[in-house]
Structures are given as C-alpha cells and as structure tokens.
Amino acid sequence: MAGEQHSVFVTGIGVVSPFGRGMQPLWSALLEGRIATAPRLEAYSPPANLDPSARTALGRCSLLAADAAIQAVEDAALPFTAQTAPLLGVVFGSSGGEGEKPVPGAPSTSVARVLGIAGPVLGLEGPGSGLAAIVEAFELIKRGAAPVVLAGGVDLLAALSAVGGPQARPFDARRRGSVFAEAAAAIVLEDSEVAEGRDARVYAEVLGGGMAFSRATVMNPAPNFVDAARAMRAALLRAEVFQGEVETIFASANGDFEGDEIEVRAIKDLWGPNADRLTVTSIHGATGHAPAASGALSFAAAIRALEAGIVPPTTGCESPDEAFAALDIVIGAARTWRFNTAMVNDFSEATNVSVVLRRSE
C-alpha cells in the first residue's frame, strides 16, 4: 500500500484524566472551567472488560495506558481478528515509570499484549512523548508500515520528580508553576482508505507534525523560544499548511513562568503581526500537567473542540500577563466558534512537539 498518497484520520479517542474515565467527563470539566482537585487518581479502578490476569500482572502505568487504549479501540469500533492483528501498531509515550521502578517501553508493549496487536510497537519516553507518539504513528501510516496505529501517552505522579503549587495558571500574570497530575490518552489513527472502507466515524484529519530539540546546555539550561518555533514551523511544513490557515492553538502552557513566555515568544516569532488572529487556549490549568501525557490529552481536547465548534477556556487564567497581550487567549468561558484547523503544542526543557489537525468534513 502506498501510504503516502492517503490521508490519516482520527477514528477513536480514549482518556483517563483527573476528572475520570472517558472523554465526556474531561470535556464537560473543560467547558465548565473546573479544576482537578485530586491530581492522583486515588479512586481509579481498571475497566471491567480488562482480563483479571492482566489487572494483576500490569503495573499502574500500563493499566492506565491499557484503559485509554481499550476505550479508543471501542470508540473506533476496530475489528480484531487473527488476520487484522499484524496490521495494527502501537506507539506510546511515558515517563518510564511503573510505580517506583522504571520499566522502559512497558506501556506500549502492555497495550499491544492486552489488545492482541501484532504490528509495529514502539515506546517513547520523557516529556512530550505522548504527542511525539502521535507524530510517529502518523509517519508509520504515511510510510505504509501499518494502516492503523494506536498512539498516546501516560504519566504517573510516582514517575515525576516534584509536585507544583495548589493551582496552575497558564498565561496568567500570577502564575507560579506547574501542578503535576496523572493521566493517559490514546488515539486511533487510520489510513483514510482503510477508514473509509469500513465506514468508520472520522473525528478529524491529522495533517502533519514536527519536533525540535531544545538546545539548552549545562551552562545555560533554559530552553530557547527559537527551538519551540522550529517545531511549529516543521509541523506546518509537513502538513503543507500556511500559518494563516491555523485558527486555534491548544497551547503547551501549564503555568510555568518561563515556559509560558517561551511559547508566546515562539508564536509571535512565527506569526509576527498576525499572531492576534489566533485563538489560543490551554487545558492544563484544569487537568494539571502530566509531562508524557499532556500533549496527547490536549490533542484529544482539540479533536473534540473541532467537532463541537467550541474552544474551552484557559482555566486558571484570570489576568493574562501583559506581555501576552498580542494573543487572543480564551478566558472566562468557552467560546463557540466553528473553526477548521488547529495546532497542538507540547514544549519542554528538551523536546518540542507540534501537530496540525483539521476538522472532518
């Protein structure tokens, strides 16, 4: 199959967030501007349709990943047979933790085993790896390596080094840092010919993604806005989209003082005087920040926003930093707006990832 000539569609979404299992609890919380009060999923229990032996064998990180993956394949109504198993792939990102012990690649291999997937399986690690997994899944499909790929990210508080303050305030003048949280998000990506052939429901089309390393050094550890701009520029080039076609950005901003400023500077650098035409929001004031999963969670929210024609507000942002006045940041309440093209960002001290997606017609 010459995958490069086909489009890549999103046909399934699965989410485990601080607001509960499923996309609807997350979406409702975002629209209402609610803040997650328990970043660790203390009351979490695995899905009932997960094999009891798997519940016992899997670590917490893999359980969350498997939960989101099961939701996504059910949402996509993917057929699983001995014949289709080798055609399906998995790419999952994580912070490399299973409780207190690092188990590299565990979520991706566990998801493949639980679901009986026999195609290419890749595990990514570190901040931004969930959104990077979606970019890699897109490329696998474009190369013809697999017609259907399950991609996403997962993170545990146990795998994180610190917990931030009581409330994250993305873009706000009073922001004081990230608030870490647990989460998992899984997305089913399909070659357009396959999706259309089985009459699948299509949420959106992935147009392309880009990645760039932050060239921080031991002597100068602060990331550079130029590198974040390079990721966005690479995504636009891969997507074959002009800056002016992007209408909404689901930002990486999570209330980190320098990180939010870097993202805004990168946007202004790339869009120049047209930056004020963008609608910008961030979900991380509501969900908290799960470094390996936040990008995938934002991607899921962007898909839902495209479908509904509603941009959720930036929870926690009440008084935007004056330095960000050039941007149209959605605050206070959700904004009803039928837009077509969005960008999702996930920037960190190391990896910068951007993805461009378009509403399904």
Image (cartoon, rainbow, N blue to C red):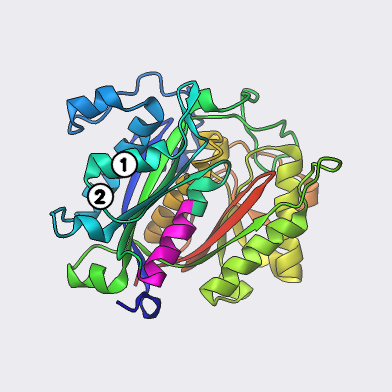
Q: Report x, y in % for residue 11.
A: 30, 59
Provide residue 129's location: percent of width, then percent of height.
Answer: 52, 47
SS under mark 2: loop
Q: Nearer the viewer, residue 245 or 94?
A: 94
Q: How many marks?
A: 2
Q: Position of residue 237 (x, y in %)?
A: 59, 74
Residue at point 38%, 57% (across, down): 308
Image quadrant occupied by the N terminus: bottom left
Residue at screen point 16% across, 53% down: 80
Position in image of residue 222 (x %, y %) = 79, 43
Determine whether, in the image, residue 90 is placed left or right of residue 208.
left
Q: Earlier in the sequence, mark 2 or mark 1?
A: 1
Q: Nearer the viewer, residue 334 or 108?
A: 108
Above or below: residue 296 compared with residue 11: above
Q: Which quarter of the figure is the C terminus placed in?
A: bottom left
Q: Marks 2 and 1: CB-CB under 8 Å?
A: yes
Q: Is residue 320 above or below residue 55?
A: below
Above or below residue 338? Residue 331 is above
**Disc number at residue 111?**
1
Residue interval drawn in magenta: 133-144
Could you say whether the residue bearing mark 1 is in a helix, strand or loop?
helix
Q: Which residue is mark 2?
A: 117
Q: Label 2 amino acid?
A: Ile
> Residue pushed farthest right?
219
Residue 136 part of the magenta segment: yes
**Residue 331 visible within the image:** yes
